[in-house]
Amino acid sequence: MSFASFDLHPDLLRAVDALGFTTPTPIQRDAIPPGSDGRDVLACAMTGSGKTAAFLLPILHRLTGRPRGVTRVLVLAPTRELAAQIDEHRRELSRFTRVSGAAVFGGVPMGPQETAFRRGVDILVATPGRLLDHFQYPYARLEGIEVLVLDEADRMLDMGFLPDIRRVMRHLPAARRQTLLFSATLPPAIVTLAREILRDPATINVERAPAPAVGVSHAAYPVASELKLPLLVELLRQPAVRNVLVFTRTKHRANRLAEGLARRGVVAERIHGNRSQSQRTQALAAFKRGTVRVLVATDIAARGIDVIGLSHVVNFDVPNLPDDYIHRVGRTARAEAVGDAVTFVSPAEEGDFRSIERVVGARIPRVTLSSFDYAARPVERLEIPLADRIATIRRQKADERARSRATAERRGLVMSRREPARPAGRYR
């Protein structure tokens, strides 16, 4: 089967060919026909399966040749990275058409986004929170919406966006529209939402249990928690390890890990919720260019990173939920390619990892590196206990207050504690 069998506009087929796409992935094969026919779609699609093109191609086919100046399509995504990624795919697939678009998300100025509203771009890709910020102003009106896409719907619900999604939908026209809902998993809340907003949808892979991408090779590395950093450094020395996306449990650990790698001569960047949007964008761009070999991330990036030829995903910390494991490792072996998923498993994490194995449906092989000394004593702690961090912050603040007071005393701005105050009312 080829993309030509979908009877898409020739300009879209030209773009598909330029991107090197030859055979549709299963989700594309199943979702494009009903999407092109104008039907609602409920699709359960694993990360890395090619679902972005599965909803963009029918949308672009619908818009090609239509009058411009009206926003007809709204795509909602849970994270900034995913919104930017979808908009990038939109540009690639529409390169030979006049279809326009823009991404609307937080962490960047609202001015250019306001311009996109006023210009009436054809496709708007947005995160719910920033879209609601714009809805406070009269220029942000979307009366012409004909297609609504909810991408990674389960992730949006996990992040608490369900109330925001309902608020967004109240700003959309009540007239009949096509709605496409894509989700990596189908928890009860998603099923309920689908019943509310979809009309006689084409259902795709709904009964499929969550599973990693087919091309992923899984391995577990049992290791003491305090030896994970040196083990990662040793793993990076292996010839087959070209570029690595490393997931940590917390933002603090992501920072510490990136710093620890840098001290060992490994070029690494980090991406998480405490980084500004410009920092996150620059880090991801450097990783995609290959100027940074290692990108350390928290789960905020698990569904927003699309890197061609990513060789390894490393779970530095075992995720708490099996679904998070599936989304993490889906960053490699994308679009039916191949890749390796490595998980460092400490003794305390064995229980969580066994839950992952039950979802995967197989025991993941345990692996050791013959060149690594598993009995070595760590030279530093990656995780600084919270009590120690709080104590350090308090000492720093106390020192800052002491220095500020000493400076003020030298300038005569405050009375020195060594000089007793003169009794009030006694002047000679």
Image (cartoon, rainbow, N blue to C red):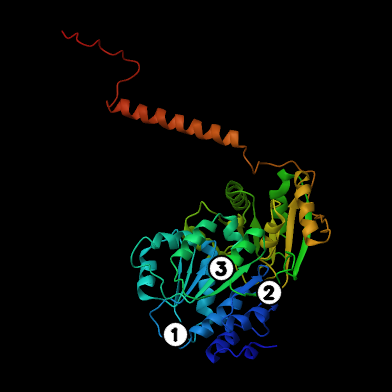
Q: CA distance from mark 2 to mark 1?
A: 30 Å
Identify which amino acid the numbered label 1 is placed on.
Arg
Nearest the eye: 242 or 213: 213
Residue ID at (73%, 71%):
338
Residue carrying label 3: 197
Judge from the rendering whether residue 63 lies leftward or rightward of residue 246; answer left or right: left
Residue carrying label 1: 98
Q: CA distance from mark 3 to mark 2?
A: 17 Å
Identify which amino acid the numbered label 2 is placed on.
Ile
Q: Nearer the viewer, mark 3 or mark 1?
A: 3
Nearest the eye: 351 or 183: 183
Is tag 2's residue or tag 1's residue first in the polypeptide sequence? 1
Judge from the rendering whether residue 347 lies leftward or rightward of residue 111; answer left or right: right
Q: Is residue 244 above or below residue 54?
A: above
Residue carrying label 2: 204
Describe the element under mark 3 as helix, strand or loop.
Answer: helix
Is tag 3's residue or tag 2's residue first in the polypeptide sequence? 3
Asked which quadrant contains residue 295, the reply is bottom right
